[in-house]
Amino acid sequence: MQYIVIKCGGSVCDALSDSFFQQVVDLQQSGLWRPVIVHGGGPSISALLKAFNITSSFVNGLRVTTREVLDTAEMVLSGKINKQVVRRLKQAGGKAIGLSGVDGDLLGAEPVSGHEKLGFVGQIKQINTHLLHTLMEQGYIPVISPIGVDQDGQHYNINADMAAAAVAGALQATLCFVSDIPGIYVEEGESRRVLKTATNRQLEQLIDDHVITGGMVPKVKAAISALAYQVPEVVILCGKDEQALAAFCQGEAVGTKIVMEGAAIHG
Ligand SMILES: Nc1ncnc2c1ncn2[C@@H]1O[C@H](COP(=O)(O)OP(=O)(O)OP(=O)(O)O)[C@@H](O)[C@H]1O
Ligand SMILES: [Mg+2]
């Protein structure tokens, strides 16, 4: 039995088919996998901010989070999207339970480095894995909204990719980023192709070269941090590809697999 953290991008959540959620439920019911979902919500947060006439900006793919932005992000993530994911897993015949990082102190947080520019953006300090294990033992698929809380009760907006990486690290889980692209693109002349495998060093170079930009920056940084926590495997795949998740879990090469350079040599 292997834990798998599936990070569902807000970019793709609405486009995920019933068959995607069926795959998650099937993985769990096979008894071979214990899935945990962490979801994002970027586009829905942007839409509600716009409706509220609140302006927001990004620094290196992270949303600058004022108190108003935090409240809006929490409404969207822990209210709307979290419950949508729970409902869709239930429709697929699964038992799902939605939690934000605030519930049961699931995601203990602190301000992220650089918070002077970013506001209430947090990073995870500790995870209540006991709560996750208890729920999974009862047959639940935990669905986590990436809002964290510190010891004083302050809430933080946590990039969902980073939250997923930290949860995967804590569970020593396989980590699967489900997004709206088939993997990491690199330019080749006029066309672009998807990398089948990418090492941490290659990715750092691609960030420096501005080939990787926007939301892909925190995603690859999170992927690398998960590998530093020694999770067994990290992949980025496309949620619109109907069978990609199941294929990945059967050991097929899909999307972009991220590996630590020299990992085989240095253990
Ligand atoms: N080299 C690259 N290859 C692939 N995608 C890239 C690259 N550079 C930038 N991107 C962008 O990164 C986006 C994916 O990150 P994004 O944060 O938007 O989605 P997500 O993490 O799935 O959703 P959310 O942040 O809402 O959870 C892609 O849609 C693409 O526009
Ligand atoms: Mg993102």
Image: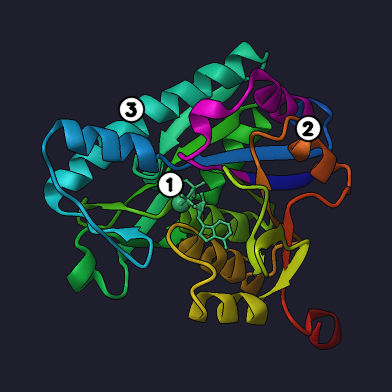
The percent position of residue 6, horizontal first and vertical second, equals: 62, 43
Who's the residue at 19% across and 36% down the image? 50
Label 2–label 1 contact, CB within 8 A? no
**Could you tell me which quadrant the C terminus lies in?**
bottom right
Which residues fall within the magenta stretch?
6-26
What is the crowding at mark 3: few (fewer than 14 residues within 10 Å), some, or many (at least 20)? some
Most foreground residue, 26 or 107: 26
N-term mark: 2 or 1: 1
- Whole-angstrom CA distance, mark 2 to mark 1, is 31 Å
Q: Amino acid at mark 3?
A: Gly
List the single residue furthest toward the bottom: 266
What is the crowding at mark 2: few (fewer than 14 residues within 10 Å), some, or many (at least 20)? some
Most foreground residue, 153 or 12: 12
Q: Amino acid at mark 2?
A: Gln
Residue assigned mark 2: 243
Residue assigned mark 3: 79
Label 2: which secondary element = loop
Residue assigned mark 1: 106
- Whole-angstrom CA distance, mark 2 to mark 3, is 28 Å
